[in-house]
Amino acid sequence: MPEELAVVEQILSANDRIASENHKLLERHGVLAVNIMASPGAGKTSLILRSIEGLRGRLRVGVIEGDVAGRVDADKVAETGSPVVQINTGGGCHLDAPQVSSALERLPLDEIDLLFIENVGNLICPTGFALGEHLNVMIAHVPEGDDKPIKYPGMFTVVDALILNKVDLMPYVDFSHEAFQTAFRALNARAPLFDVSCRTGEGIPAWMEWLQSQK
Ligand code: MG
Ligand code: ZN
């Protein structure tokens, strides 16, 4: 194996080892962890806020916010009363297992049933780094176009659920739901697709129901 490739392999296996420790820790505390991935601006934080609201009184939600910089999203989550930890990757374009491990140390895991891990906005490399999650969920959004499954097949292939956000914008944007769905199904036959609008709340109940069924 060329030396550079060997180094990448080592980093990945170290990441996988810590991810599996994270997973065991979550299991011991009865926490279901959901890794949320999307491009920037797709509505990851909006979906998390809607979900916290929708699950109130049913599941206790905790959040890990991954961003390159700042804590604007963590502040929004904190306003809901849910425990939240912000990770700043300082330029890194995805979360890794060691970052999630240090965030887990700062969360009250016995007071959480469901943990959202909001990954850094990026459609490519987050899928390459296991975090210890139980479920991988992707959010696509109407304004980014219906061709994303064709251009970024990797993420669409591995996800356990796909959310199409901002469906309220469909009348104003050239977006073929049929083309989108066909391209997605060519890659992934099993993951449910939820059409939602985090702005209007449309489609959120079906997503809530599915999420609860995974617990
Ligand atoms: Mg966000
Ligand atoms: Zn990356």
Image: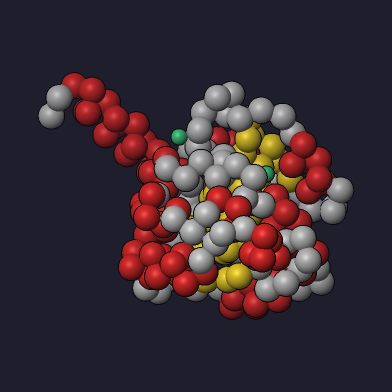
Look at 70% across and 50% down and name the residue there.
45
Give the quadrant of residue 163: bottom right
* Colouring: secondary structure
Look at 58% across and 63% down and name the residue there.
164
Horizontal relation, residue 172 to residue 18: left or right: right
Look at 75% across and 41% down and name the residue there.
74
Horizontal relation, residue 203 to residue 180: left or right: right
96 in relation to 159, above or below: above
158 in relation to 87, above or below: below
Q: Out of 151 and 114, give the one closest to the viewer.
A: 151
Query: Ligand 1 is located in which of the four quadrants?
Result: top right
**Residue at the extreme left of the image, as rendered:** 1
- The spot of residue 167 in percent (x, y) is 65, 65
Number of numbered labels in the structure image: 0
Q: Out of 111 and 40, give the one closest to the viewer.
A: 40
- The spot of residue 49 in percent (x, y) is 76, 56
- The spot of residue 82 in percent (x, y) is 79, 53
Q: Can I make out residue 206 in this image?
A: yes
Horizontal relation, residue 11 to residue 131: left or right: left
Q: Out of 66 and 24, give the one closest to the viewer.
A: 66
81 in relation to 104, above or below: below
Quadrant assignment for the N terminus: top left
103 in relation to 177, above or below: above
- The spot of residue 95 in percent (x, y) is 52, 38
Q: Can I make out residue 21 in this image?
A: no
Look at 49% across and 59% down and name the residue there.
146
Quadrant assignment for the C terminus: bottom right
